[in-house]
Image: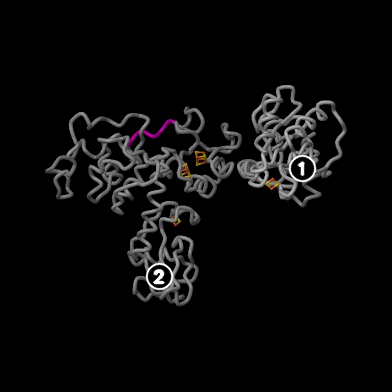
Amino acid sequence: MTHITIDGIDFDASKGSTILDVAKFLGLEIPTLCYDEGLSAWGGCRLCLVEIGTGKRTRLVSSCTYPVEEGLVVRTATKRVIDARKMVLELLIAQCPTSKTLQDMAAKMGLDKVRFKPKWEDCIYCGLCVRMCEEQMNAKAIGFANRGEKLKITTPFNINSEDCRKCGACIYICPACTLRCDGPNPENVLCGRCYNDLQPTCLDVSDDYNCWMGLKYLNVESTGFGAVCPSPHIEASFITPPNSSRRSKSSSLPLPDIQNAPGYGCENGVR
Amino acid sequence: MVSTIIEDAAVRHHGLLIPVLQEIQEHYGYLSEEAVKEVANKLGMKISDVYGVASFYTAFSFTPKGKHIITVCNGTACHVRGASRAVDILSEELGIKPGGTTPDMQFTLETVACLGCCAIGPVVVADGKYHGNMTPAKVEKLLLNLRKGESIEKDKICV
Ligand code: SF4
Ligand code: SF4
Ligand code: FES
Ligand code: FES
């Protein structure tokens, strides 16, 4: 057992667990992106930053990779932590504003501006797909290639890989593949947040109701969230069925036709 | 044969990936798809791993390179001493951009960021031979010599 203090709570953590494990156990919320319970921790996105140490000697570490140590003092929600996370998220959104996962996070964290030039890329290099393919699918069909600006996720030589099982797991786990809706202002770096100003978030809504924006079957009475739809933007024209190139993480939406797709089942390239 | 080279190299380098790739690169001037697959196979690795490493380093290339490889240093020191002029001249003379290979497979033009010999910049490396203080005139002369097929000693420095 390792004794740590996390947000003022004294806790005996089992050896080898990470700060994130403990926080989860105690119900302390830490946002994560490149972390998944079924995969090895990677520490790539830096969204799960927490502050460790006391007095003037504190520093930020990624909680998903930091193993607990005796006497460790952790704070998960100081101003420094929140600011750092927001900055990270701002950068991630600038890279890939089309990700619904990121937009939801932004809404949750109250991010209301993005100061960086949007790049509209379709990957944030979280490495989830690569680890998924390797660790769960045992295929290792995709990997990081090149470096620096040219870094990308791809199959060897950018062509169909014989190692790929066409399982679609990489697409399933990809946070950039959960495309945000064409909402009121698709050109905006931050989405309209029709539902995002409330909990549950956009992703939860579309998952539960399997509908475009969660709006088709939802109206003021039946939201179940006890709230009048906050969005002034919603008009009939806006409630359109998802166009096929836009995917939701919902399991009931038709899965992409991986078998017949060029490359790996994602129009954006290899996923 | 690719496979014999790989087997041989794999034994000599105790199955280490990068030296094996280096030998293939040296021998064939590039890493073919076949070679990468073969290496993965021989070393018991996944192709995506080999590809990841090979694509990381600029020393490896997936496309065939020319007979003569001309590398111009465009690091800070060489740049301020006018390396861009050397690049311009070579690009114009050869009709290719940096990174390109002439259609007759004679020349490949590359740029790098610092070769570690800034004192003699701007530096141009032609087939492993370092040429320092490269004025436009010297660049032209170098190219002429290469075209004439003058024999070049490898890894020699000439200032
Ligand atoms: S679809 Fe292919 S690349 Fe994606 S996780 Fe499955 S095996 Fe890996
Ligand atoms: S393709 Fe998706 S899962 Fe893979 S690294 Fe990029 S954003 Fe992450
Ligand atoms: S979740 Fe910890 S760094 Fe991404
Ligand atoms: S900058 Fe050219 S050798 Fe250092």
Q: Residue at x 49, y 71 (%)?
A: A15
**A68 on left or right of A247:** right
Question: Which label belongs to residue B132?
Answer: 1
Give percent across and percent down for residue A225: 18, 49
Q: Which residue is mark 2?
A: A74
Q: Residue at x 53, y 40 (%)?
A: A152
Give percent across and percent down for residue A189: 34, 41
Q: Few, some or many C-alpha atoms within 10 Å of disc 1 (few <14, some 14-19, many ≥20)?
A: many
Whether residues under marks 2 and 1 lie with C-beta atoms below 8 angstroms apart, the answer is no
Name the one closer to the observer, A230 or A263: A230
Q: Residue furthest left?
A: A221
Q: In the figure, A76 relative to B93: above or below?
A: below
Q: Nearer the viewer, mark 2 or mark 1?
A: 1
| Region of the chain picked out in magenta, as a range | A253-257
Q: Residue at x 41, y 37 (%)?
A: A120
Q: Secondary structure at mark 2?
A: strand
Name the one closer to the observer, A175 or A139: A175
Q: Amino acid at mark 1?
A: Gly
